[in-house]
Image: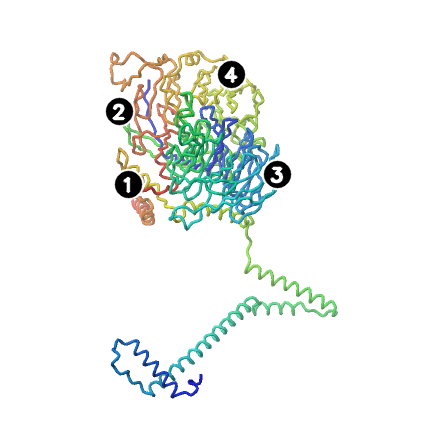
């Protein structure tokens, strides 16, 4: 500590020694060579630079953190806004509220207001339901189906999943064919799924052409 | 004899479903089999391995375990979390019970048959009490973390072994706590990443647990100490099924590569008292995963994803050389799935979820015997009728004129009227059916298409009169003996006077349709009838039974005919003993009244009743093209029994002019053979290679040199 506070000379000496040590250890030079001369200014500049870098990184980190916090705050605000009613909805409610207002006793007015509130709330709730909810069949949603599916997935993955070393029936039959007495063609010689789109298009074109020919003939 | 022109039909894409689990009932000698589409089949092993009952499946039902209780109660449990008990008389589920544990993976009954244990997805083992008419939830054993995939009771009923992922637990039934936890090692180096699934456990009476797991090991554990006794590394893939014989001296295991391995309790040195479990036999009858295996007294029965049921006899247990000592493969159902409307040449194919109606093609050319003729009119698919609801179709039929189609599921019967102009097909559903019709085991139209005969689930036969405007219920026939066995065969005579029905108790009843009374009952023969038909002219009833015997009964005289008695005395040719599949269809040649044609899955034969029966030792002569040969050259022996083994014209004067829709000349299994007018024969074939090419993926086996 004392050496550090004293600053320049002691630090410089230490740093020089360190530099020298580094040079001694790093370089493949022999012990006879003189250590390299490092000036005071250069060393000072180095030190200052390193301190500045450190300060800058700290500042940058702080800023980044701030940015992140700000962004998160914004996101929360947006979500909150989305959850709350939109501006239009509020206007609608207000207009409905003021429209239904007639000259009545205060009590009745209060009751009506509360009813209107409920109505409007219901209206609002119904409108909201239409947007974010939908009706589904209970039969499709029952837990049992998902459990049964997960059980069948388990057995399928154990028998046919990755790592089970399965091959196709065509391969197995080809193997039998190869070792059998009568060697014939493979059972599934042609991959029928290949080019199905092109084949479909060709069929349609052929039909169209035939139709056009018959129309021309007629 | 006769020359026929043949339609070879190969557009029936029949695809059976893979076998998931099976259970053998040794008291009743019956095997119950559950398939992946939810259907349950029962085979009667003492009756020539005949497929006695078929309970159709359902889309919402899935079966993972099947269990017999007593002689006549059958339970299944599946991934939809439900336990189903079946009514074996009405061939439908009696009731379903939700176990509330999620998908059920396994079910086991204790040896005293008082309790059921179910292993569920949530890790709990649920105990149900078996009452005479239902089962009732009793309690849960301690819930564990992983899903319970296999269960086995100890013979005493006090301990249950449960297999889960990487671990086998032994539960004490009384307290419900897990008393032993056995960790299963994950196997050789390649499989260490995946957890080891214990697919099967079996608890032997000397407190040894046998387990088969996904690393391909069959291991023997000591349940008291929780230690490993022996490991047998059986395959590189999973051991999917395990079964212990009744006297616990043999264990059979089925693997994913299609092998079935037997272990026997033997002493390694002769004369030594100490016995060990030693791997003895390996069978490879399957090409795909073997998911169900069981053992009877004399055979090993296995079934798997290649949809075949294989019954392999163990030669050291078989004592008599009888039909028991033959390897059997049951691939096709023992009933006909094809109906034929002869006049308009229509074929109706029955699938579990739809019906398809096809019109046969035709040819205008004439050819020489043995030639294949080019097709001028292609066969066309007229109609595809999908069923409504989840239940699978159990029976269907089309009328002779082709204007009516009917099918039935376990919950409903539907009748359709078909109008078929040259190119336009229109189908209308008959909406108001009589209320008495709920479900049917068999449907049959009368020969003039004016009546529909429905064999209902209550073992009665309803007669419904059909007309364009409405259908009325005319009469109900009840069996004379009052038995409630399901009726599986119906035959109506061509003149509309007689109706015969055959039920699962081997009873054949004949009813008079004009007087609407019961006429007589054919003497009961021990074997189940597999096909039945009434001769159009002589009104003789021809019956074929599951043990390949053929009888003829005269309905008018109420006794067996002379021809039938002669046939029984002399017996049929020894070639008949090679037939393993039952005869599924009998029909008559419209142009020659004495010719009877019957077929099973691998061959069809024509019997001419006028000609003398063949001697047992006689040789058959091959008679080629008798029309070209002169009178003097024809051999003198004219046999009554001509057999045509799949277009290898081995014997008989059957000359075939073939009309080929697909090019192939190998013998394929037959699904249906019928005689149309003008000497046309329609043969519906289903090549096994077509079924094999649509099976799921098998394991990859590296063979040297490929």
Q: Are marks 4 and 2 on the same chain?
A: yes
Q: Would you say the residues marked 4 and 2 are in contact, meaning their CB atoms lie under 8 Å apart?
A: no
Disc 1/disc 3 C-alpha distance (Å): 56 Å
Q: Nearer the viewer, residue B504 or B125?
A: B125
Disc 2 versus disc 1: nearer the observer: 1
Disc 1/disc 4 C-alpha distance (Å): 60 Å
Disc 1 target residue: B704
In percent of width and height, residue B231 lies at 42, 40
In percent of width and height, residue A205 lies at 31, 48
Disc 1 versus disc 4: nearer the observer: 1
Disc 3/disc 4 C-alpha distance (Å): 43 Å
Sooner in the amino-acid sequence: mark 2 or mark 1: 2
Q: Which mark is residue B523?
A: 4
Disc 2/disc 1 C-alpha distance (Å): 48 Å
Which quadrant does the N terminus of chain B fall into? Answer: top left
Q: Secondary structure at mark 2?
A: loop
């Amino acid at each position: 500590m004392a050496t550090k506070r004293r600053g320049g000379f002691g630090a410089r000496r230490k740093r020089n020694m360190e530099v020298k040590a580094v040079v001694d250890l790093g370089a493949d030079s022999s012990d006879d060579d003189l250590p390299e001369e490092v000036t005071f200014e250069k060393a000072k500049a180095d030190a200052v630079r390193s301190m500045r870098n450190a300060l800058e990184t700290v500042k940058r980190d702080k800023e980044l953190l701030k940015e992140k916090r700000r962004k998160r705050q914004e996101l929360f605000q947006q979500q909150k806004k989305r959850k709350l009613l939109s501006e239009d909805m509020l206007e609608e409610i207000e207009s409905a509220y003021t429209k239904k207002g007639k000259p009545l006793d205060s009590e009745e007015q209060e009751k009506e207001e509360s009813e209107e509130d409920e109505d409007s709330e219901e209206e609002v709730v119904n409108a909201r339901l239409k947007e974010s909810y939908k009706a589904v069949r209970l039969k499709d949603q029952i837990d049992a189906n998902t459990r049964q599916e997960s059980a069948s997935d388990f057995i399928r993955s154990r028998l046919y999943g990755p790592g089970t070393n399965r091959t196709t029936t065509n391969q197995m039959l080809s193997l039998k064919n190869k070792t059998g007495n009568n060697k014939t063609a493979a059972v599934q010689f042609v991959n029928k799924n290949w080019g199905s789109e092109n084949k479909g298009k060709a069929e349609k074109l052929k039909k169209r052409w035939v139709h056009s020919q018959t129309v021309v003939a007629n | 004899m006769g020359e026929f022109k043949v339609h070879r039909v190969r557009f029936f894409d029949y695809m059976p479903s893979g076998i998931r689990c099976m259970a053998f009932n040794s008291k009743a000698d019956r095997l119950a089999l559950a398939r992946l589409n939810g259907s349950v089949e029962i085979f009667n092993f003492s009756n020539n391995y005949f497929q006695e009952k078929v309970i159709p499946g359902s889309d919402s039902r899935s079966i993972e375990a099947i269990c017999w209780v007593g002689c006549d109660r059958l339970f299944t449990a599946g991934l939809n979390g439900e336990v189903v008990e079946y009514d074996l008389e009405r061939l439908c589920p009696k009731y379903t019970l939700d176990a509330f544990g999620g998908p059920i993976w396994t079910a086991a009954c204790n040896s005293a048959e008082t309790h059921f244990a179910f292993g569920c997805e949530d890790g709990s083992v649920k105990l149900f009490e078996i009452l005479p008419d239902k089962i009732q939830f009793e309690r849960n054993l301690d819930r564990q973390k992983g899903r319970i995939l296999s269960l086995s009771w100890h013979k005493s009923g006090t301990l249950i072994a449960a297999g889960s992922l990487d671990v086998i637990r032994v539960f004490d039934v009384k307290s419900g706590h897990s008393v032993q936890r056995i960790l299963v090692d994950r196997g050789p180096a390649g499989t260490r990443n995946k957890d080891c699934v214990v697919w099967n456990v079996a608890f032997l009476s000397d407190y040894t647990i046998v387990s088969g797991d996904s690393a391909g090991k069959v291991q023997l554990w000591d349940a008291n100490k929780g230690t490993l006794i022996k490991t047998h590394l059986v395959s590189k893939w999973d051991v999917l099924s395990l079964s212990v014989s009744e006297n616990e001296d043999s264990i059979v295991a089925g693997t994913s590569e299609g092998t079935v391995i037997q272990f026997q309790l033997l002493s390694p040195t002769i004369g030594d008292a100490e016995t060990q479990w030693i791997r003895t036999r390996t069978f490879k009858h399957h090409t795909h995963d073997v998911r169900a295996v069981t053992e009877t007294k004399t055979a090993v029965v296995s079934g798997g994803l290649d949809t075949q049921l294989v019954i392999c006899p163990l030669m050291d247990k078989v004592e008599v050389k009888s039909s028991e000592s033959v390897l059997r493969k049951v691939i096709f159902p023992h009933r006909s799935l094809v109906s034929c409307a002869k006049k308009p040449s229509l074929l109706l194919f029955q699938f579990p979820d739809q019906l398809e109606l096809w019109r046969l093609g035709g040819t205008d050319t004439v050819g020489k015997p043995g030639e294949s003729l080019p097709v001028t009119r292609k066969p066309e698919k007229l109609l595809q009728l999908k069923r409504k609801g989840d239940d699978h179709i159990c029976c269907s039929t089309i009328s002779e004129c082709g204007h009516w189609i009917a099918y039935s599921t376990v919950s409903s019967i539907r009748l359709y009227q078909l109008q078929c102009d040259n190119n336009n097909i229109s189908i209308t559903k008959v909406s108001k059916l009589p209320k008495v019709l709920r479900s049917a085991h068999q449907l049959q139209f009368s020969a003039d298409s004016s009546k529909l005969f429905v064999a209902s689930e209550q073992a009665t036969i309803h007669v419904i009169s059909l007309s364009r405007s409405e259908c009325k219920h005319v009469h109900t026939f009840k069996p004379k003996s009052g038995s409630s066995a399901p009726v599986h065969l119906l035959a109506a005579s061509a003149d509309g006077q007689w109706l015969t029905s055959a039920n699962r108790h081997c009873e054949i009843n004949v009813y008079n349709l004009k007087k609407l009374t019961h006429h007589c009952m054919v003497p009961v023969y021990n074997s189940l009838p597999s096909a039945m038909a009434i001769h159009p002219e002589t009104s003789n009833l021809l019956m074929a039974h599951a043990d390949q015997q053929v009888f003829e009964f005269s309905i008018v005289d109420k006794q067996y005919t002379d021809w039938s008695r002669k046939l029984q005395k002399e017996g049929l040719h020894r070639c008949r003993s090679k037939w393993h599949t039952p005869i599924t269809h009998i029909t008559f040649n419209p142009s020659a009244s004495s010719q009877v044609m019957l077929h099973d899955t691998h061959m069809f034969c024509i019997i001419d009743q006028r000609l003398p029966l063949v001697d047992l030792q006689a040789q058959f002569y091959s008679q080629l093209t008798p029309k070209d040969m002169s009178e003097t050259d024809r051999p003198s022996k004219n046999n009554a029994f001509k057999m045509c083994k799949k277009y290898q014209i081995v014997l008989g004067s059957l000359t075939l002019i073939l009309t080929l829709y697909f090019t192939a000349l190998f013998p394929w299994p037959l699904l249906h053979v019928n005689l149309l007018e003008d000497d046309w024969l329609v043969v519906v074939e289903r090549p096994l290679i077509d079924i094999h090419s649509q099976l799921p993926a098998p394991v990859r086996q590296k063979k040297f040199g490929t």
